[in-house]
Image (tube, rainbow, N blue to C red):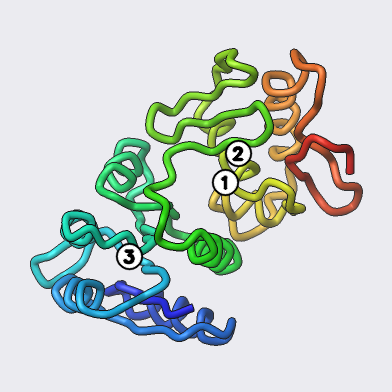
């Protein structure tokens, strides 16, 4: 894939660009909004990793809105320290296909970028996730299963979103600690077990088929068939 990284933080940009190149991708980098917009609008990319806050008088949302206004459907992963729900909604509504908050694990960034690349340019922004009869609305922050609304706490919602984005894949405790709790160390608590148990009570227990599966000695997987 040919990927454009628009990121002004030198350390973050170097980390991302190096990792993407080591994974076999061709990468271009812009460290300000003006150069980022020029490259994004004038060259062909399979995906863009875009920071929200950029120097140069043009921020990430402006780049997104300009591209979408030009009918440019290149998949865009927004990478930002702005983690509040309303900020994530703004990014998706502006035309972002996915939103990853800082700090982040490179393995997750790579998986998300490659997933966007596989989808190609034919799809619009991802605002809903669906696995079997379970649906998650990223904009309305609502979850339904078999048409029945399920009320989740913010952390439970984030946990379910992570599992749904990795449906059919084994999700390890380390991945959950990094992707859901923003921990880059093991706090040596049962916080994951507690939240998964609560999520199961709401998402699985009232329904005949369990979706959240435990993978022994590995982690968890969201799928309809037993592991």
Q: Look at the numbered disc 2 and give the secondary structure of its residue.
A: helix
Tell me which numbered mark, 3 or 1, is placed earlier along the sequence.
Answer: 3
Tell me which numbered mark, 1 or 2, is placed earlier along the sequence.
Answer: 2
- Counting the numbered discs, the total is 3
Q: CA distance from mark 3 to mark 1?
A: 20 Å
Looking at the rendering, in which quadrant would you find the C terminus?
top right
* Residue 108 versus residue 143 in the image, above or below: below
* Residue 167 versus residue 4 in the image, above or below: above
Residue 110 falls in image quadrant: bottom right
Q: Position of residue 218 (x, y in %)?
A: 84, 53
Query: Cβ–Cβ below 8 Å for labels 3 and 1?
Result: no
Badge 2 crowding class, 10 Å Cα cut-off, few under 14, some 14 to 19, many 20 or more, is: many
Badge 3 crowding class, 10 Å Cα cut-off, few under 14, some 14 to 19, many 20 or more, is: many
Q: CA distance from mark 3 to mark 2?
A: 24 Å
Mark 2 highlights which residue?
A: 159
Q: Position of residue 183 (x, y in %)?
A: 58, 54
- The residue positioned 49% from the left and 78% from the top of the image is 1
Judging depth in this view, the residue of 110 and 182 nearest the camera is: 110
Q: CA distance from mark 1 to mark 2?
A: 6 Å
Judging depth in this view, the residue of 29 and 65 nearest the camera is: 65
Mark 1 highlights which residue?
A: 180
Which residue of the protein is positioned furthest toward the front in this rendering? 122
Residue 222 falls in image quadrant: top right
Badge 1 crowding class, 10 Å Cα cut-off, few under 14, some 14 to 19, many 20 or more, is: many
- The residue positioned 26% from the left and 62% from the top of the image is 72
Mark 3 highlights which residue?
A: 50
Q: Position of residue 34 (x, y in %)?
A: 14, 74
- The residue positioned 33% from the left and 39% from the top of the image is 89
């Amino acid at each position: 894939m040919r990927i454009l990284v628009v990121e002004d933080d030198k350390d973050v940009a170097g980390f991302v660009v190096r990792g993407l190149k080591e994974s076999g991708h061709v990468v271009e980098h812009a460290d300000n909004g003006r150069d980022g917009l020029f490259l994004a609008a004038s060259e062909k990319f399979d995906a863009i990793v875009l920071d929200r806050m950029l120097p140069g008088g043009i921020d990430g949302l402006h780049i997104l809105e300009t591209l979408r206004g030009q009918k440019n459907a290149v998949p865009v992963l927004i990478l930002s320290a702005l983690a509040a729900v309303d900020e994530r909604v703004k990014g998706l509504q502006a035309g972002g296909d996915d939103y990853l908050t800082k700090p982040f694990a490179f393995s997750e960034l790579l998986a998300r970028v490659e997933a966007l690349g596989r989808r190609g340019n034919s799809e619009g922004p991802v605002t809903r996730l669906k696995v079997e009869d379970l649906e998650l609305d990223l904009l309305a922050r609502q979850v339904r299963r078999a048409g029945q609304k399920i009320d989740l706490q913010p952390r439970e919602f984030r946990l379910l979103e992570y599992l749904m984005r990795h449906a059919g894949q084994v999700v390890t405790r380390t991945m959950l600690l990094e992707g859901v709790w923003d921990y880059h160390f093991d706090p040596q608590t049962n916080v994951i077990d507690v939240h998964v148990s609560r999520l199961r009570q709401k998402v699985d227990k009232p329904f005949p088929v369990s979706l959240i599966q435990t993978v022994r000695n590995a982690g968890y997987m969201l799928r309809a068939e037993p592991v």
